[in-house]
């Protein structure tokens, strides 16, 4: 049993310091995942929701439930991936709402505002594609979250989702193809 798994076990038993230790040990992984998300979703750094901000918001979401449902490092990162997806989606929806005016009078947009709105629409479109994909196979969505939103490898994703490696690889390839089709419709 690894150090993080042991600490998570202690945290489930009520040791608050164990949870803090897990966060300290996994913080670099969360930063790596957030950087991966920014490079995958945005063509430029979004100054309104940077890597550190994404990690902090993710931590707040995960801290609400603490270690109650987390079994190991890979599972923690899979949960973090889902939290990051939701945070980015909420952020994109907010930006898209602002683009539509959010109840204020319309002004001429500068070129960088058009880019922000376009990126927000892309994140929303990806989320809609993932919802459609979930109707086909929920496992594909979990794999996409782990690979795209947490930057996990094939092996880490398979461990996090308790799937055989070959099944994970096959579903990842299928998910990428299906998302391309869904986004092109």
Image (cartoon, helix red, strand yellow):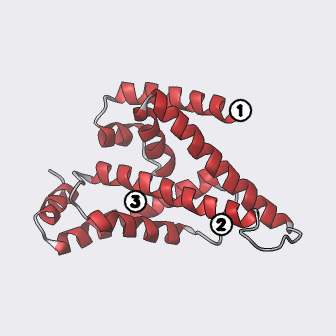
Residue found 68% across the figure and 63% down from its top? 97
In the rendered image, the vertical position of residue 41 relative to residue 176, given as above or below: below
Give SS at disc 2: loop
In the rendered image, the vertical position of residue 77 relative to residue 163, given as above or below: below
The percent position of residue 61, horizontal first and vertical second, equals 38, 65
In the rendered image, the vertical position of residue 165 relative to residue 142, given as above or below: above
Say the numbered circle drawn on residue 29: 3
Crowd tier of the residue under label 2, counting other residues whose Cα lies within 10 Å: few below 14, some 14–19, many 20 or above: few
Numbered disc in front, either 2 or 1: 1
The percent position of residue 135, horizontal first and vertical second, equals 47, 31
Q: In the figure, is residue 64 to the left or right of 35?
A: left
Q: Disc 2 and disc 3: Cα gap in Å?
A: 20 Å
Residue at far right of view = 108
The percent position of residue 166, horizontal first and vertical second, equals 37, 25
**Looking at the image, is mark 3 or mark 1 earlier in the sequence?**
3
- Mark 1 = which residue? 184
Rendered-image quadrant of the C terminus: top right
Residue found 19% across the figure and 55% down from its top? 5
Q: Quadrant of residue 179?
A: top right
Residue found 22% across the figure and 59% down from its top? 4
Pick the front one: 145 or 132 = 132
Say the numbered circle drawn on residue 46: 2
Give SS at disc 3: helix
């Amino acid at each position: 049993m690894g150090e993080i798994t042991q600490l998570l076990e202690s945290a489930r038993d009520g040791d608050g310091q164990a949870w803090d230790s897990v966060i300290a040990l996994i913080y670099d992984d969360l930063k790596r995942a957030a950087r991966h998300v920014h490079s995958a979703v945005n063509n430029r750094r979004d100054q309104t929701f940077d890597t550190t901000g994404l990690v902090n918001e993710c931590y707040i979401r995960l801290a609400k439930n603490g270690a109650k449902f987390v079994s190991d490092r890979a599972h923690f990162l899979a949960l973090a991936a889902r939290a990051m997806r939701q945070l980015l989606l909420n952020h994109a929806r907010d930006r898209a709402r602002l683009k539509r005016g959010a109840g204020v009078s319309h002004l001429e947009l500068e070129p960088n505002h058009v880019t922000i709105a376009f990126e927000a629409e892309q994140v929303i479109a990806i989320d809609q594609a993932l919802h459609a994909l979930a109707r086909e196979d929920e496992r594909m969505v979990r794999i996409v979250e782990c690979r795209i939103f947490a930057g996990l490898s094939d092996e880490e994703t398979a461990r996090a989702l308790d799937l055989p490696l070959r099944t994970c690889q096959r579903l990842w390839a299928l998910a990428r193809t299906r998302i391309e089709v869904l986004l092109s419709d």
